[in-house]
Image: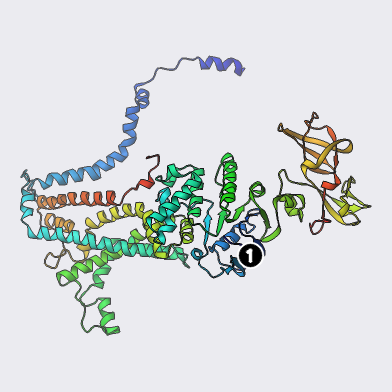
Amino acid sequence: MSATTIPSRAFRERPKESWLAKLFDSKPFLVALCLLPCSGLLIVFMTYPLGLGLWLSLTDTTIGQAGDFVGLDNFISLFDDQIFWNAVGYTIFYTAVATSGKFMLGLWLALLLNHNLPLKAFLRAIVLLPWIVPTVLSSIAWWWIYDPQFSIVSYVAVDVLHVSDQYFDFLGSPWAARWSLIAANIWRGIPFVAITLLAGLQTIPPSLYEAALLDGASGWQKFRRITVPLLMPILSVALTLSVLFTFSDFQLVYAITRGGPFNSTHLMATLAFQRAIPGSQLGEGAAIAVSMIPFLLLATMVCFFGVGRRKWQQGGDND
Amino acid sequence: MANVSIRNVRKRFGSTEILHGVDVEIDDGEFVILVGPSGCGKSTLLRMIAGLENISSGEIAIGDRVVNNIAPKERDIAMVFQNYALYPHMTVRDNMAFSLSLTNASKAEIDEKVGRAAQILGLNPYLARYPRQLSGGQRQRVAMGRAIVRDPQVFLFDEPLSNLDAKLRVAMRAEIKELHQRLQTTTVYVTHDQIEAMTMADKIVVMNAGNVEQIGAPLDLYDKPNNLFVAGFIGSPAMNFVKGKVADGAFTAEDGTILPLPPSAAGQDGRPAVYGIRPEHFRLAGDGLPARITVLEPTGSETQVMAHFAGTPIIGAFRERIAAKPGETIRVSVDPMAAHVFDGATGQRIGA
């Protein structure tokens, strides 16, 4: 029976396609359709705000009043603004010092965690804690730690250990506040660096260290000649991300000092917010935010190309 | 160059003993292969010689020096790892020069030694390449080059050919053997492949479950295996075993087949025993014992026959081309001089 029905089906003419079927058979349409959810999100939440920021920076908009196009006036006035330049200087200092601190301590922690320690999984989970806690919450905790009267550090140093006879002034003077914020930022950034580098360390085959041991390498030589070069690719990615996060940091500083005392701890991001929202000068705030872009691009380039992909990683012949 | 003595060496991981007292004497310039199935402790023993594992008890001496408490780098050994352990971020030249560069050797000395090793191994065209730009065989050679550059007293090889394809393995086998003949450096080589052991070694150490089963020259192990394990491990296809007992100056298989005993194994009446015959020691004989063929494998140079013989499946290898088909019966005889008899209880060889 089936032998007679199948041929007649096979030769049956295809029904005429509706316009909808044709549309869904068209490759360009399908590509666009599949890209839509992702590109839509990116456009709405990334491209639009960025474009709006760029536009605002060229206007004199204030809150509640649509502004006019003023060209580069905002940037020109920022050029003579000492508070802006202080913020730029502190942002660079903050990024440089905090990133170095994070990487030194993070690498050290990663090396420790890479050993066979008891409770290894538990320790690794603990290390991640500062990263898991929302920054605003941990910032408030730091705010208490740095409090002039109720600081636990001061309490321990003065009332318990008696190594000092007066309470520390963490946030009261510019440089003390700057270093305090950097310390809090380092604390918060270490887990990211440590876990990333730990992942990198675990990709290095143990036999390389055994070979180096037989070749006569000391611990330091193994670290310098094997670990560091093999860690470079992942280190450069972690470094780039860390520099970006630190440079555009906002929460920590705004939660602890709000830029004070005397605007001494303003980062570019906090200054931009300060001017734009509490100060209602949207145009000027946007201009400060836009000024971060060249710094971020430069930092990314340096990190990425300076310590990025190495020749030995690339495949193929190059002779 | 130096001899290596392994004296009553034991290795424990926690309460588990991996090596149960191993004794091996390796002469100066000898090529010794440690062979055995996975988990027999051969790699652990090699790593103990290298200093990558500590020695739970007993001692290992290289030359006249007991090295139990000497750091790996002071032992004057070089090791080739199974995965080669080449430094991926260094060129072939830097890989080979690494050990020298750590000792602050002069550039001229490094160039000279690396040049010599590259010359020996034919690596000159590849000195500027990175490991990932090399084929498996070339990487293998770089790993050996790194060992040669150090000019050590002992070379250690840890399954160096197991990552290569079959054809390359045969080629590298010959290359390593030739290298040893040229350099005459004492070599300890670990493998699970008995063919590698048979073809390359001056002396084979057969290990099983943390014990040394037998030590000897390849053909000695082949001709006179001490026990059932060695008899079954060395040789391919493996030796055939027929269970039964010795009775009335002959061997009686469990199904009643009578097989001739070698003279040295006679006079052990009533003892349960295992009769061993290598595949090539069967002969076609019109008046022989029946063997019912299950599979025939003609290879051209010989014919391998899987058959049912004396109540046991066996493999025979015949020079003759056999016209019989599976299911048919051929008649084969066994040369008593080539047969092996093992104690049924202990597995030890009976007779010389």
Q: Amino acid at mark 1?
A: Ile
Residue closer to the observer: A170 or B222: B222
Image quadrant where one finds the N terminus of chain B:
bottom right
Crowding near the residue tagged with mark 1, few <14, some 14–19, many ≥20 C-alpha atoms within 10 Å: many
User: Quarter-wise, where is residue B10 in the image?
Assistant: bottom right
Q: Position of residue B276 (x, y in %)?
A: 80, 48
Camera sees residue B22: yes
Left/right placement of residue B147 relative to residue B217 reads left
Name the secondary structure under disc 1: strand
Residue closer to the observer: B294 or B45: B45
Image quadrant where one finds the C terminus of chain B:
bottom right
Q: Position of residue B189 (x, y in %)?
A: 60, 54
- Give the residue at x 71% y 49%: B234
Residue at the right extreme, as displayed? B248
Q: Position of residue B96 (x, y in %)?
A: 44, 52
Left/right placement of residue B39 relative to residue B330 reads left
Left/right placement of residue B78 relative to residue A43 reads right
Answer above or below: position of B317 versus B41: above
Residue closer to the observer: B157 or B288: B157
Q: Which residue is mark 1?
A: B6
User: Quarter-wise, where is residue A201 in the image?
Assistant: bottom left
